[in-house]
Image (cartoon, rainbow, N blue to C red):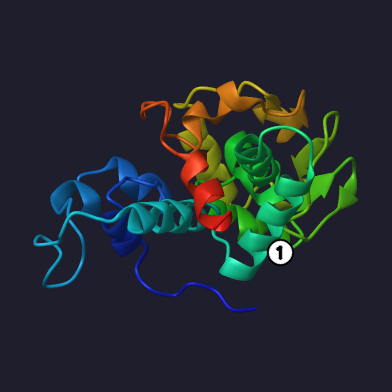
Amino acid sequence: MARYRDSLCKVCRREGAKLFLKGERCYTEKCAFERRAYGPGQHGQNRRKPTPYCTQLREKQKVRSIYGMLEKQFRLFFGRAERERGITGDNLLRKLETRLDSVVARAGFAVNRNDARQLVRHGHVLINGRRVSIPSYSVKAGDVVEVASGSRQIKRVVDAMAVAERRPACRWLEVDRGNFKARVASMPDPADFRSIVPGSEDLDGKAIREELIVELYSK
C-alpha cells in the first residue's frame, strides 16, 4: 500500500496549521512549525494570496494529512458521506473520527494516528474481544476497543498512555486507562469536532472547515 514518506513537519508548515502529526514532539520547542511557521521551500515566505480553489484544495489536503489517507480512500469516504442523510460535511467528519485508528489515538493508546495505525496493523487492538487489523474499520456505538493483553507493555503504548493522562478526555469515549479499554458511548456529533486533532483541544472551534471540502468535491 502506498503511503506518505516525506517529512511530516513540512505538512504542517505547508497547511499553515499545527496538525500534531508527530505526537509528543509537537508539544516541545523542537516543533518545526513553532520555529518556522511558513511554507517549506525557498519561496515559502513569499507566496501569493490563495484563490478560492486553492483554499478549498488546501483544506482537503489538510484533512487528508490529519487522518493519514490517500486521495482514493478519502474520496471514497466522501462519497459514502454524501449518500447518507444529513449534512455531508458532518457525515464525513463523523466517518473519519470513527475509523479504528482514529479511535485508538483518541483513547490515548497511541500518541498519534500514524502510531495507532501501526498498532492496529500489527494486531495489537481488539474490538469486543476480537482482533481487528484494519485501520479503516468503522466502530459503532457500544463497541469496546482495547489493547490486547499481551501488548500492554509495549513501550510506545505505555509512553502514549502517560502522555494521554495530561490531556482532556474525549467526550464520546468512555476510557478506562487502567484496563487499556475504551467504550464508544455514542457517535460523535458536530460539537465533538471542535478538537478534531488528538491533543489539540486548545485549537479554534473551526480547526477544520469541512464546508470547503464539500464545495471542492461538488464542482
**Which residue does the numbered mark 1 point to in the structure image?**
121
| Side of 189 where 47 appears, left or right | left
Along the line of sight, which residue is nearer the eye, 28 or 2? 2
Give the camera-side residue of 218 and 8: 218
Q: Name the amino acid, label 1.
A: Arg
Q: Residue at left 67%, top 38%?
A: 94
Q: Quadrant of the C terminus?
A: bottom right
In the rendered image, residue 34, in percent from the top left (x then y), is placed at: 19, 46
Residue at far front of view: 219
Q: Furthest residue to the bottom? A: 2
- The image shows residue 93 at horizontal and vertical percentages of 61, 40
Residue 155, visible in the rendered structure: no
Is residue 127 placed above or below 163 in the rendered structure?
below
Q: Position of 152 compared to 185: left or right? A: left
Q: Is residue 114 above or below residue 157?
A: below
Image label count:
1
Q: Quadrant of the N terminus?
A: bottom right
User: Between 160 and 150, which is closer to the camera in this rendering?
Assistant: 160
Q: Quadrant of residue 209?
A: top left
Residue located at (83% from left, 55% from top): 132
Residue 164 position in % (x across, y down): 51, 33
Residue 85 percent across, percent down from the top left: 78, 35
In this rendering, does residue 71 appear at all? Answer: yes
- Secondary structure, mark 1, is helix
Quarter of the rendering containing residue 117: bottom right
Instruction: Report whether 187 appears left or right of 114.
Output: right
Other-residue count near label 1 (Cα within 10 Å), few / some / many at <14 / 14–19 / ≥20: some
